[in-house]
């Protein structure tokens, strides 16, 4: 295999810059992008203890976070990430919202926040106001890579028993994600090693 390229470093630098440029120009937001920013914000900016995504078993949360530094205030916050406005409106039809707001039965987080990109900010604000929804709203700004809280959420639940079960599920999910991420890392590392071996066989002229 022969690659006609005089400068190896220049070749890879150009490739990486092109990939970054394409991502910057792409106006579409993805739920995975917002979830990653949310996790970093919760753990590093807010300096809370634990957060995990895709926590299931009766709650089906996009993300759950907790701050356990103060045992008396170990409150759990649920986050629902939305990048489509119609999907956001449809979310309120889920049975769990009836439990959260009306019956107060089953597992209920202390707080609930929608997380949306800046492109949905005005519509999300208006919808929450028009429907008199008590949930909070967090907005993601891609340019500054920052989240800001537009609307806070009043406390939905104060049951220590419910909080303990959610905390258990959160810990289980966080452990599972850590194992899965390590497995993925090892697989990608092995693939990279093979790519480097092939690259070393390449002749640059």
Image (spheres, rainbow, N blue to C red):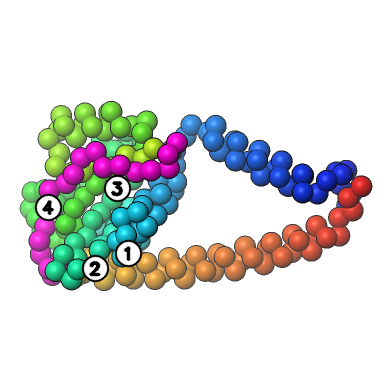
Q: Going from the N terminus, do you reach mark 3 or mark 4 first?
A: 3
Q: Residue sitting at 42 percent across and 39 percent down?
A: 144
Q: Which residue position is annotated with label 4?
A: 155
Report the Cα–Cα distance between label 2 and label 3. 21 Å
Q: Going from the N terminus, do you reach mark 1 or mark 2 first?
A: 1
Q: Which residue position is annotated with label 2?
A: 68
* Label 2 Cα crowd, 10 Å radius (few <14 / some 14-19 / many 20+): some
Q: State yes or no: discs 1 and 2 in contact (Cβ < 8 Å).
A: yes
Q: Going from the N terminus, do you reach mark 2 or mark 3 first?
A: 2
Q: Which mark is residue 7?
A: none
79 inside magenta stretch = no
Q: State yes or no: discs 1 and 3 in contact (Cβ < 8 Å).
A: no
Q: Which residue position is annotated with label 1?
A: 50
Q: Residue sitting at 77 percent across and 49 percent down?
A: 9
Q: Residue sitting at 59 percent across and 36 percent down?
A: 22
Report the Cα–Cα distance between label 2 and label 4. 17 Å
Drawn side of residue 184 relative to residue 86, left or right: right
Quarter of the image for residue 105 reads: bottom left
Q: Which residue position is annotated with label 3?
A: 80
Instruction: Report the span colored magenta.
Output: 142-163
Q: Position of residue 123 (x, y in %)?
A: 27, 28
* Label 3 Cα crowd, 10 Å radius (few <14 / some 14-19 / many 20+): many
Q: Position of residue 5 (x, y in %)?
A: 85, 43
Q: Going from the N terminus, do you reach mark 2 or mark 4 first?
A: 2
Q: Going from the N terminus, do you reach mark 4 or mark 1 first?
A: 1
């Amino acid at each position: 295999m022969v690659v006609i390229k005089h400068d190896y470093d220049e070749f890879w630098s150009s490739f990486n810059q092109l990939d970054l440029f394409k991502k910057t120009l792409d106006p579409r937001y993805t739920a995975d992008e917002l979830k990653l920013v949310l996790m970093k914000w919760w753990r590093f900016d807010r300096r809370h203890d634990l957060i995990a995504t895709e926590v299931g078993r009766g709650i089906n949360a996009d993300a759950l976070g907790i701050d356990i530094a103060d045992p008396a205030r170990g409150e759990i916050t649920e986050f629902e990430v939305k990048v489509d406005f119609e999907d956001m409106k449809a979310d309120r039809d889920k049975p769990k919202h009836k439990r959260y707001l009306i019956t107060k039965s089953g597992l209920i987080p202390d707080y609930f926040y929608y997380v949306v990109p800046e492109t949905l900010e005005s519509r999300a604000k208006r919808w929450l106001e028009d429907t008199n929804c008590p949930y909070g709203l967090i907005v993601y700004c891609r340019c500054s890579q920052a989240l800001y809280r537009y609307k806070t959420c009043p406390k939905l639940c104060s049951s220590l028993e419910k909080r303990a079960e959610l905390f258990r599920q959160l810990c289980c999910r966080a452990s599972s994600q850590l194992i899965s991420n390590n497995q993925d890392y090892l697989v990608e590392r092995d693939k990279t090693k093979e790519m480097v071996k092939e690259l070393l066989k390449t002749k640059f002229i």
